Image (cartoon, rainbow, N blue to C red):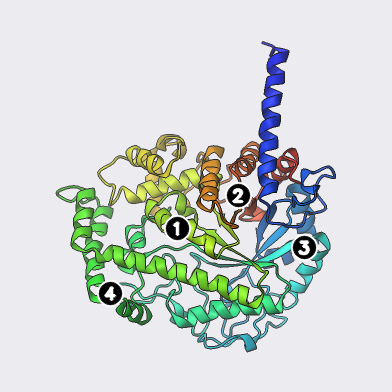
Amino acid sequence: MNTPSNEKNAISRREFVRTAAVAATAVGTGLGFTATSARAANSAAETPGTPPPMIGFQAEVSYLLQYGIARFFDDVQARASVNTLFLHANLFEASWAGLDRATNPAGHFATAHPQYYGNVLMAPQALSPGDFDLPDAMQKITAETRKRGIKVFPWMEEDNRPPPKIKGMDQLYEIDLYGRRTGGHPGGPCLNNPYFRNLISDSIEDYIRSYDVDGLQRGSERQGPLGNALGAWHHGAKSDPGHTSCFCEHCAAKAAKQGIDLDRVKKAFLALEPYVRDGRAGKRPRDGYFVEFWRILLRHPELLTWENFWAESMREMQREFSARAKSVRPAVQVGFHIWHNIAFNPIYRAEQDYAPYTKYADFLKPVVYDNPAGERMTSFVDSMTQNVFGDLTHQQMLDFEYAVMDLKEKSYDEIVGGSAATYQSQLREQPINGTPRGKFERFSADYVYRETKRAVEGVAGSKTRICPGLGIDVQLKNSTPESVREAVEAIFRAGGSGMVISTSHAAMRPENLSAVGATLRELKLA
């Protein structure tokens, strides 16, 4: 049936008003990033005083060199109007003595300048021609970015990668419940280890003074010891509660100054350990999982004390990160990547309150990857129904998640798209953070809108900007041009000041990346 002309006009008017509102919000909250040559000549972003939003792209330096720097920028500018490069900067770069290259294939753009480093338990040394062919990588990259009007941000991330085999590196890592060094996720470098803090602080000064960078982004895909013991993150069901951390001498000394009894803390986690192990084995407590969890918490409140101790240490490091960067160059932009776990784990969400960031962050990049979010949520549900929420079915747990996290998405069966038993069996076979095979449903653009809007409201009244991480073909190849278009529109409709396209250019199908630029042009933001 044909649509009446007056209805067509009404739809057009609604679309015009919606699009205009999105564009006005975006350009009015821009970070002042320079537009690229790919923008439309009649863009609303060209209006004086209304700079375009930040359109960032994450990349590995070794990938840029292999793919071709100019070729890469030609592609991402033409397809997505990119004006900012987030260049992955491994904290333990290729210029540390004793590096095993096999454990660090990504490489690094930054050679270490020893004059900036104090006691980091490692020996900084300059990159040589044999080190990934990177000695002049930054010069090659900035030669392209400057003539294109693209800004460069080192993306200083610590996540779930195993520690590189560098002499002294292991001494920076956390100590678990049984006195063992952690060797990967969910453990990592200890936030209270002075050598690790020196490494972060000294690297900041080295990057800013040695290279023509416009800002820094810190990323940390980690959480506290209680969440880690429970396996409370996506694909965390195989976590070992005995490996939770940190209980090192540096944490012990800091805790003592705060009046925290570390022996009682350890006893608390030792009491939690069999509860988690029994749950993984399907041994239901007499009074149920939820009641037993609260019984342990009531008897051992130190579990929450130590969780908060870890979270406060992270916030302390973030404040120091910003302060050090600003002390070297006051105008440098400082931002923080917020782990995707904020969309699944209510405890982590509580710890990652956006309001405190407004005191030290110029921008935040909360991950709002719609394309892997559905499967990540179901894997989180699978993990948590083996302990705290083991009294619930998977669908009941998912409904609980949607209620407390303010989300409205598809059912458990719809997301996994097949036999729940087969999916759960695959999860059991996966290593920590492994993704099972299969076709999984995405979360909707409504999820992207809600998470962006929540972040925008969380920093309201401040100068901190929200530039969400837009996931395209992340792990699961289920993005489409339409889903990308809707996600981009949702970010700006919710008040986002930009976005960072993630995570791998090599994994993104060209038509999906092109949908970013097409949508920005529709919104007159490029």
| Residue on which disc 2 sits | 470
Residue 65 appears in the figure: yes
The extreme left residue here reads 286
Question: Which amino acid, by three-letter code, is at mark 3?
Answer: Gly
Tag 3 and tag 4, C-beta contact below 8 Å: no
Q: Which amino acid type is shown beneath numbered disc 1?
A: Gln
Circle 1 crowding by C-alpha within 10 Å: few under 14, some 14–19, many from 20: some
Q: Is residue 321 above or below residue 240?
A: below
The label nearer to you, 2 versus 4, is: 4
Give the labeled residue for mark 3: 68
Q: Residue at x 73, y 72 (%)?
A: 212
Whether residue 187 is visible, yes or no, is: no
Q: Secondary structure at mark 4?
A: loop
- Decide: is 98 above or below 366: below
Q: Position of residue 245 (x, y in %)?
A: 35, 70
Callout 4 crowding tier (Cα within 10 Å): few <14, some 14–19, many ≥20: some
Quadrant of the frame with the N terminus:
top right
Whether residue 387 sits left or right of residue 286 in the image: it is right
- Residue 391: x %, y % from top left: 25, 44
What kind of residue is marked 4? Ile
Which residue is depicted at the point 81% across and 68% down?
143
The residue to which callout 1 is attached is: 352
